[in-house]
Image (cartoon, rainbow, N blue to C red):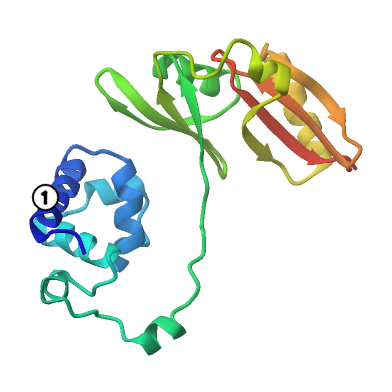
């Protein structure tokens, strides 16, 4: 069990992140505190969040019902309740792309690929996310090379994979991107395993796969 003083500091850090609208903390709040589970990131950061909320967040992450239970060392959940608790469901996933300019990257995804900006954080910005329908990509500023030379292109190392449901959609998406002047690492191609896909090359060299059924 971590030191109680360190846990108090952790709670204050969560509180500070919420006040500063640090978006990654919203997912932790939503996952741990039931009253925030129906809210999206923006709504969570706009909601009231006090020190006792942050302390409850820390306690629940450690398996306690609340801060007082944590301090007394009494587990809030009985063994039986743990056995009957529903299996956690992963509700979403987001790939993270390493980029050299957040604003320029946002411009590429909105102007060329039809995404919308979900959020941008920092002044100057160092983190953000773009979204289109159910596909979300996180953007992380990195000012030094992440990969050696051209290994991504040589080894076809994907940074993200995005799917559509029908053959007509993947064809239309490719034609839309082609008309927008997007650079492709691979043009539309039917694969031996029955998929039809293409790979977009973003300004930072990230390879983004778009895939759908062949027929």
Report the side of 139 relative to 8 (left or right). Answer: right
In the rendered structure, the answer to whether residue 163 lies left or right of residue 110 reads right
> SS at mark 1?
helix
Which quadrant does the N terminus fall into? bottom left
How far from the left and from the top, in percent, is residue 79? 36, 86
Q: Which residue is mark 1?
A: 9
Q: Is residue 10 above or below residue 37?
A: above
Q: Residue at 52%, 51% (x, y): give it.
A: 92
Tell me: 25 left or right of 91: left
Question: In this picture, is 188 found above or below 195?
Answer: above
The residue depicted at 68 percent of the width and 22 percent of the height is 200
Figure check: 42 above or below 141? below
Q: Is residue 172 left or right of residue 207?
A: right
Q: Position of residue 187 (x, y in %)?
A: 80, 20
Front residue of 204/77: it is 77
Q: Position of residue 150 (x, y in %)?
A: 64, 12
| Residue nearer the viewer, 22 or 12 | 12
- Classify 69 as above or below 187: below
């Amino acid at each position: 069990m971590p030191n109680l003083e360190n846990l108090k500091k952790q709670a204050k850090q969560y509180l500070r992140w919420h006040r500063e609208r640090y978006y990654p903390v919203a997912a932790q709040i939503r996952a741990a505190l039931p009253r925030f589970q129906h809210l999206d990131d923006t709504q969570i950061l706009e909601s009231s969040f006090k020190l006792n909320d942050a302390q409850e967040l820390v306690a629940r992450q450690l398996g306690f019902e609340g801060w007082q239970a944590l301090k007394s060392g009494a587990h809030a959940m009985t063994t039986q309740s743990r056995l009957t608790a529903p299996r956690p469901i992963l509700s979403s996933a987001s790939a993270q792309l390493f980029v050299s300019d957040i604003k320029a990257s946002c411009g590429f995804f909105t102007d060329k690929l039809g995404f919308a900006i979900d959020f941008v954080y920092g002044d100057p910005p160092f983190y953000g996310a773009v979204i289109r329908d159910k596909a979300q990509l996180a953007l992380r500023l990195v000012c030094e090379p992440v990969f050696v030379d051209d290994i991504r292109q040589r080894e076809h190392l994907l940074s993200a994979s995005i799917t559509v449901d029908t053959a007509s959609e993947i064809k239309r998406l490719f034609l839309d991107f082609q008309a927008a002047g997007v650079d492709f690492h691979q043009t539309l191609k039917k694969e031996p395993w029955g998929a039809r896909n293409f790979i977009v090359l973003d300004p930072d060299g990230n390879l983004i796969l778009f895939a759908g059924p062949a027929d």
